[in-house]
Image (cartoon, rainbow, N blue to C red):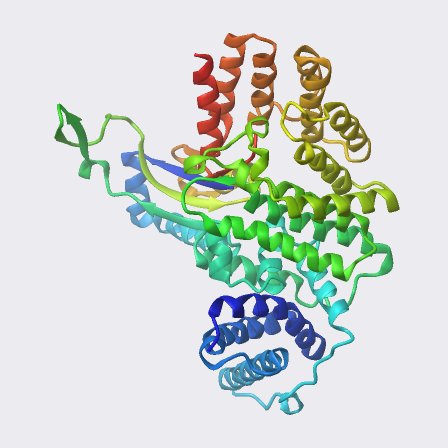
Amino acid sequence: VIDGARVEPLLRELAPQVLGALVRRYGSFDACEDAVQEALLAAADQWPAEGVPEHPRAWLTTVASRRLVDEVRSDVARRRREEGAAAVAVADERSQAPAVERPREHDDTLTLLLLCCHPALSPSSQIALTLRAIGGLTTAEIASAFLVPEATMAQRISRAKATIRGRGFAPPPPEELAERMRVAEHVLYLVFNEGYTASSGPDLQRTELADEAIRLTRLLRRLAPRDDEVAGLLALMLLTDARRAARTGEGGALVPLAEQDRSLCDRAAIAEGVALVDGALASGPLGSYQLQAAIAAVHVEAPSAEATDWPQVLALYGLLERIAPGPTVALNRAVAVGMVDGPRAGLAALEAIEGMEGHHRVEAVRAHLLEMAGDRAAAHDAYRRAARLTTSLPEQRYLEARAARLG
Amino acid sequence: MRYMLMIYDNPDTRELFTSPEGRELGAEVDALMERLTESGELVGGEALADPSNTRTVRVQQGAPVVTDGPLAEAKEHFGGYLIVECETIDRAVEIAAAWPSARFAPMEVRPIMDPAGMEM
């Protein structure tokens, strides 16, 4: 008898491999995905009590294939009953014990991931489908992480599967591959952000999302080892997650970067992240995740907030603004300008940003810069405005507390 | 992001929706709910009883003081809500605009506070 906690990671790892083998064999992603979920549930139920089978992947593939065949049979039977019509052929007999297709499993998993991140899907559907089909999470787990009822999430997943039905199971054409990889990276980045956020209350599922995003990005890195942006993304996640323990105070309170206790940071994650980002930056064209990771490295490597190398942070934001301009980058750059050239220069940079009017982060940065400039009354008002604008409870508590300090 | 779509009623709209002429409006509601369920956007929702069934509760000097009827007499009252999860507030507004009672009384769309937050 083995511990259920050891079964789960194994199942998560095998899930996309089994699904890949099934989809390659039977074609229907939609039906195969359902069958694999059922096989995973059966394994989670049986393995802890009966032991892990000698060939766990073959076990899952066989069980999932049987489910799939049963499903096809009952569909056919239903159709026959409904239509009272002639027989519809079922090509299932050869499927009893499918051979495991080892050489292709890597490519299959990548093809699956890119299918789950298909541009025809909305970001929330891409996320849900990726977590289920590649991550091996149950619908209930995904629903709980995103704070919606299971029925809502189930519906979202089945709609996503309907959207990509008939897309075919093949890698994207070479001219589309780079763009499709960027979409997949963005999906993993969004999953990470969901889990990375500070959280009040017992929302343990959310930190598990950060772990899951890191695990899936490691998988993507194995599948596409020469893609420097994947390395950059993994580095960004590791370097950000390294501060997890320092980021949240008592009762889920948000601890700002400047006040985080660096001794709580995860040294192993920092070392791995720094090595990854250094390697990626040295090897090829610059990418947005690589630069964000480089910035995260500067922050997390500083022994204290005061010792942060802000000129380097500013230079990196300058590069980032050139290759991936946008209001969020401009906002972060304004903070760095404030730290290097003084708060008034930072405020001037803030004024120049377009497209983020009425956003709480603009008001929070304004408040911070005004406080640095010694304008307590204006800083107080800006913190209050930011507190009213945010839709996050821990952010609101933090911003109200900052305002109260300036009374 | 989750949003609450707050549905406002007045005595006329409630009568309209429950009358035989309101059957088509009811069918529209059902169809919209089905679409929102199908799209995976619907998180929940309830309709509230007539405001005359309300008890208003205040605690004064440590003791509850209960009065019959709503907090404030108003022409329009809070009649029910939907909770949806959408990518943008624009989409939530679009759903509110499609809700049949919006033709007779206003709807309010408000973000629901997230228990998580970003680093500052």
Q: Residue at x 56, y 42 (%)?
A: A244
How many numbered discs? 0
Q: Is residue A284 visible?
A: no
On the question of residue A158 being in view, the answer is yes
- Residue situated in front as seen by the camera: B76 or A298: A298
Identity of the residue drawn at 61% across and 74% down: A32
Horizontally, residue A60 falls left or right of residue B42, namely right
Instruction: Identify which residue, A312 or A326, lies in the foreground.
Output: A312
User: Could you tell me residue A202's position as x and y percent?
Assistant: 41, 47
Q: Dividing the image into 4 quarters, which one contains the C terminus of chain A?
A: top left
Image coordinates for residue A48, horizontal then vertical, percent? 47, 75
Q: Position of residue A141 (x, y in %)?
A: 48, 58
The picture quadrant where one finds residue A358 is top right
Q: Please determine whether, in this image, residue A320 is positioned above or below residue A27.
A: above
Above or below A268: residue A253: above
Please give left or right for residue A64 compared with residue B25 in the image: right
The residue shown at (56%, 22%) is A364
What residue is drawn where x is 61% and y is 10%?
A373
A7 with respect to A331 (left or right): left
Q: Quick one: A53 or A300, which is closer to the camera?
A: A300
Please say if A322 is above or below A284: above
